[in-house]
Image (tube, coloured by chain):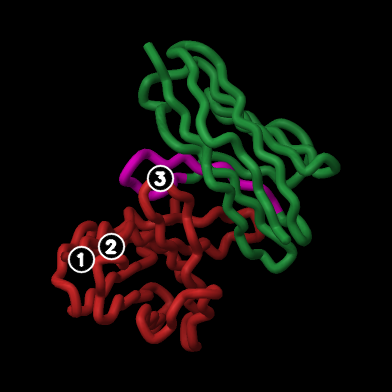
Amino acid sequence: GAVVSQHPSRVICKSGTSVKIECRSLDFQATTMFWYRQFPKQSLMLMATSNEGSKATYEQGVEKDKFLINHASLTLSTLTVTSAHPEDSSFYICSASSPAGGNSPLHFGNGTRLTVT
Amino acid sequence: GQNIDQPTEMTATEGAIVQINCTYQTSGFNGLFWYQQHAGEAPTFLSYNVLDGLEEKGRFSSFLSRSKGYSYLLLKELQMKDSASYLCAVRDSNYQLIWGAGTKLIIKP
């Protein structure tokens, strides 16, 4: 089945630094990938939709200059958290749909646990 | 607005059956998904319904009634490893996924 790989799985960084998270579709081409954030005991919150070769679409309230998304190829999207602060500490998850048709589910990466100290 | 409702938490006994309900109000409908999410992990796909009726997959079944805006996930022969959150998600007319807040299922021995 479709596999999505996300790296790193955990990262601890100091306040003010930037962190890059990679999301790869391993066995299919993903023209669209999705970035989610999940705080403890809360549901998934869509941050942005990453489109290959074009600008990402951000959800309301998500700062595009803080969360930089690049989808340079059909198998790779990256999310960079710039000038991270403790309130950015969260579980970030990427996902993609395999191009199998309308009923294809989202396949998720394993997530990245970001801790900003 | 778009809304998906699920119970926040449910408790069941090992070996028993539990039904997790999901009601939705969305702009259009292009399928309903159920995902399982263990604490600290990403969601994994469980089932998909786009037509009315029951879809069975091993110990898990999912039901859909589009006219009622209603679905349920049925888990049989519960095992301790089934303790997780179960997320209901609906794909709307724009093929956007609308997520429920999830139901935390606690299995007791």
Residue picked out by circle 3: A41
* Dot 2 crowding, Cα within 10 Å, few <14, some 14–19, many 20+: some
Count the marks: 3
Q: Whole-percent x and y of residue A85? A: 25, 72
Do residues under tags 1 and 2 come within 8 Å of each other at their CB atoms? yes
Quadrant of image for the C terminus of chain B:
top left
Q: Mark 2 lies on which chain?
A: A
Quadrant of image for the N terminus of chain B:
bottom right
Q: Whole-percent x and y of residue A27? A: 39, 62
SS class, disc 3:
loop
Query: Chain B hue?
Result: green
Residue picked out by circle 1: A116
Report the Cα–Cα distance between label 1 and label 3. Answer: 19 Å
Instruction: Name which residue lies at 74% across and 39% down.
Output: B70
SS class, disc 1:
strand
Q: What stretch is highlighted in magenta?
A: B31-44
Q: Whole-percent x and y of residue A13? A: 15, 69
Q: Which chain carries label 3?
A: A
Who comes first in sequence, dot 1 or dot 2? 2
Report the Cα–Cα distance between label 1 and label 2. Answer: 5 Å
Instruction: Name which residue lies at 51% across and 31% down.
Output: B9
Give the label on residue A89, or none. Answer: 2
Instruction: Name which residue lies at 59% across and 35% down.
Output: B7
In front: A5, or A65?
A: A65
Instruction: Name which residue lies at 34% across and 76% down.
Output: A78
Q: Tell if the residue under mark 2 belongs to the same chain as the one under mark 3.
A: yes
Name which residue type carries label 3. Lys
Whether B64 is among the magenta residues is: no
Is B77 on the left or on the right of A21, as rendered? Answer: right
In front: B72, or A81?
A: A81
Who comes first in sequence, dot 2 or dot 3? 3
